[in-house]
Image: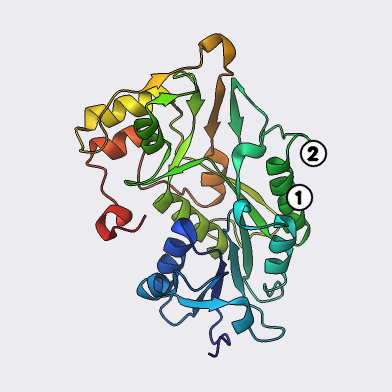
Amino acid sequence: MSTSPSSSRDLIVVGPGVLGGYLGKLWKDAYPEARVLGLTNTTNNHDRLRNLGLTPALKSDLLPGQKFPFAVFSAPPSGSQNYPAEVKAALSLWDAEAEGSSFLFTSSLSVCSEEDGGLVTDQDCPLVPLGKGPSTDRLLLAEEAVVKGGGNVLRLVGLYHGQRGAHNYFLKVKDVPRWGGYTVNLIHYEDASRLSMSIIRGDGNGPFKGRIFLGCDNHPITFQAMVDACHHSGLPGLQGEVNWTLPQAQSTLGKKVDNSGTREVLGGWEPKFDGFEAFLAAGGTDFYTATGWI
């Protein structure tokens, strides 16, 4: 199979899962002439990627020295024994010298240490120190490599869609070892994909190199409010009681996240789904519920 790029808009998505796969679809829809390559470790999801308009490939399919003007790394840390090395390998597939080119690493706001209920913004995000835990270490080292290499980082908060998210876990488990008043922040998978596309396309003040962005819907919400929104929606499958087993006295407060800075830099980007409660109140329908893609 030939995977040679043929367009200045060609994109490679390393780890084209729930987020990366939809991002690839958005890119292909916007630039039909571009080849959008979905790089995976196995062939398990290749048919699904083809249905989205992507060209699936394994590492062995790549040509020696092959590079792409646009590249995204959206694979989770759980799938790699050496995550920073995997991210660096993805950076080597990016043609940083191409005009308007961009590399994006989708990271997590778990690297932010705020847990006392304070506000986190694009400009003010205290980081977890290296050495505190293997999961945050992997992300911080990967972010460091990306920024040093001229790529961009998008720190995402809790991701959800109509069939997937923390709310599904709560309703399934029922007895949850957390405090219901803990505050979290969310962003819909579709909006995370759209935000990623806006960054790599260089909307607003782009093209961007070595920048860190923040992805959220600007509607912080408690665990209990998430469950309440499920109940109020009346949607089947989102009903049932949840028992929070961790007392308030034994819990931190969480954080409240605002990405107004990212939105401004990108020319006024706004999410399609303006908060979890509004999403469910409107029926909870999206690309994933329409296609059955979990």
Describe residue 229's horizontal placement relative to residue 91 as left or right: left
Quick one: label 1 or label 2, which is nearer the N terminus? Answer: 2
Question: Percent position (x, y) of residue 102?
Answer: 62, 66
Q: Position of residue 213 (x, y in %)?
A: 60, 47
Q: How would you rate the neighbour count of disc 2 (Cα within 10 Å): few for under 14, some for 14-19, many for 20 or more?
A: some
Q: Which residue type does callout 1 highlight? A: Leu
When the figure is inspected, residue 22 is found, relative to residue 178, above or below; the finding is below
Pointer 1: residues within 10 angstroms few (<14), some, or many (20+)? Answer: some
Residue occupied by mark 2? 130
| Mark seen at residue 141 | 1
* Residue 9 appearing in the image: no
Amino acid identity at mark 2: Leu
Q: Residue at x 73, y 37 (%)?
A: 133
Task: State the scheme by which the image is colored.
Answer: rainbow
For mark 2, give the secondary structure. Answer: loop
Q: Is residue 252 above or below residue 214?
A: above
In percent of the image, x 56 and y 86: which residue is there?
3
Q: Which residue occupies the foreground of this view, 167 or 199? A: 167
Q: From the viewer's perspective, is residue 136 above or below residue 287?
A: above
Between 136 and 12, the residue placed more toward the observer is 136
